[in-house]
Amino acid sequence: MTDISNPIQFWLNSALQGHAGRADETLLTYLRHSGRVGTKEGCASGDCGACTVLVQTNDGGAYKPMNACILPVQQLHGQAVITVEGLPTNDELHPAQTALITTHGAQCGFCTPGFVMALAGWMDEQAVSAGSDRGGQPKLDSEQAEITRFKASREAISGNLCRCTGYRPILQAAKHLASNPPVALSETHQRLDRARFDSEPDHSAPYNAGFRAPHSLDDLKALLRQQPSAKLIAGGTDLMLEVTQKQVRFDQLISLARVPALQRLEIRDDRAVIGSAVTYQDLQAATPLRWPALHHFLSRLGSPQIRNRGTIGGNLGTASPIGDLLPILLAMDATIVMSHFEAADRNVPIAAFLQGYRKTQLQPGNFIKEVQVTGLQDFLRYYKISKRQEDDIAAVSVAVRLKLDAERITLARIALGGVAEQALRLPMLEQALQGQVITETLMTALHQQALAQLDPISDVRASRGYRREMAANLLVRALKEALGLPMPQIYGLDDA
Ligand SMILES: Cc1cc2nc3c(=O)[nH]c(=O)nc-3n(C[C@H](O)[C@H](O)[C@H](O)COP(=O)(O)OP(=O)(O)OC[C@H]3O[C@@H](n4cnc5c(N)ncnc54)[C@H](O)[C@@H]3O)c2cc1C
Ligand code: FES
Ligand code: FES
């Protein structure tokens, strides 16, 4: 059902737009149907980056790259979007455009707008975050800082694919931009007029009949009471694939993105409380020193475009057997706080929350409020084996958490992803480590027990034998790392 009487409003290339349409209409569809065809459609599934646009969300921070192909246009109410058509100012190209021209970084040009937008967003983020603390990044000398910036510029385009150039000239363009001062888009493009939207009398008013974006927990619960079977959407990076890949239609969507209580992010000492609508990007920015193992891993989850939208609640809601956070949260003994529109909150251990293939304890009327984790100072490793380093899903993944008293293991948690219909813990192997001192003998015994006990699935991503060998080897690697032994860098496991 479509109600065209109550359009959303957002800025597109600095001009205020009104739009009404289906609840599940993507920004890419809107752009291309309105003649803005600079933004390309390659895969329509968030994988190729050809549809990358920049979005300044309601927090008014940096413009962030996002995939327009899986972004519901209704979620942009009150936000600002820049597409490749709007990037140049006063007929002057943006430095990202100039760099790609100078290095011959385009051949057929299909992927080029996506690369340009990803790089422009990265530069804006650099400009906005310059001088801010961002969770206590370690101080670097100028040489380290340059290497870090270059690596970051490469990471910025890790969600973009090119089938012509072989990437070398594109990487040269990125390197050039990394060695020059960043350019802030907010100096040249529309800043959000937050007052205009913050003063709306009723934030839960429908933007149209099918898409609702409550601004408080009370509003969210009231909406769920009215429409308990409406589909919840956070970042949409899983849900919108149903629309673009399987042609499922969602007539009623309730967005969780504007509920402040679901954005709670507190990390103190050994404990974290993470609101379900916290994005990976925000989690990564908050954790370099407070939870380094998670911080380090997050650059392997999806791409910058995906991390700018995807949330921890969405990963749990989908409960895919290869969802990356699930083995980590299982190893951390995380607690899922589940809310309901007419019942008290329930604290559910993650092991009980996950109930099978994409099955959880969530029922209509439920939503995940937050995730509570303790033990952030424990030894934690998460290994993800995938065919591509960037923007790929796991064939098999292994999370190991240890509490150590010198070299004695006082608590062991082992969880695997990609081996069964759901992520799972391995209590028998955990038991084998409990109270043991880490020695070569223990490593050999663990390896043999893992090979004997593991019985993974076989599918297109990997065979049973491969998964079993990898998991057993990675368990040994974790013990070696716990002892501080130097490990060879492995493609797919470590930073390139
Ligand atoms: C290109 C691409 C790459 C990806 N790479 C990875 C990867 O490397 N690793 C990985 O783990 N995942 C990956 N994903 C999957 C996805 O990004 C993650 O699962 C993400 O965490 C989903 O979060 P979201 O906010 O976008 O969820 P949404 O799509 O908004 O929601 C997903 C599901 O969860 C439900 N839901 C969302 N929030 C809540 C809540 N608070 N309470 C109850 N239900 C809720 C929704 O109703 C829906 O059923 C990738 C996806 C794409 C498109
Ligand atoms: S079209 Fe490929 S990521 Fe959007
Ligand atoms: S230049 Fe042709 S796909 Fe990149």
Image (spheres, helix red, strand yellow):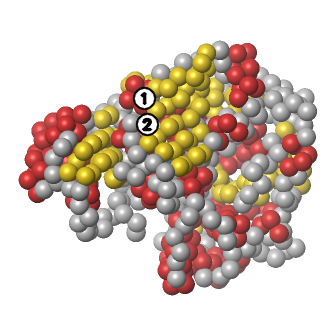
Residue drawn at point x = 84 percent, y = 38 percent: 8
Q: How many marks?
A: 2
Which quadrant, please, contains the C terminus? bottom left
In which quadrant of the rendered view does residue 75 lie?
top right
Q: Residue type at mark 1? A: Pro
Looking at the rendered structure, the secondary structure element under dot 1 is strand
Q: Which mark is residue 335?
A: none
Residue that numbered label 2 is attached to: 334
Residue that numbered label 1 is attached to: 349
Residue drawn at point x = 50 percent, y = 26 percent: 347
Q: Residue type at mark 2? A: Ala
Which quadrant, please, contains the N terminus? top right
Q: How far apart are labels 2 and 1 at the CA level?
A: 6 Å
Residue drawn at point x = 63 percent, y = 65 percent: 133
Q: Is residue 474 visible?
A: no
Is 430 situated above or below 287? above
Ranked by sequence position, the earlier of labels 2 and 1 is 2
Is residue 108 found left or right of 165 in the rendered image? Answer: right
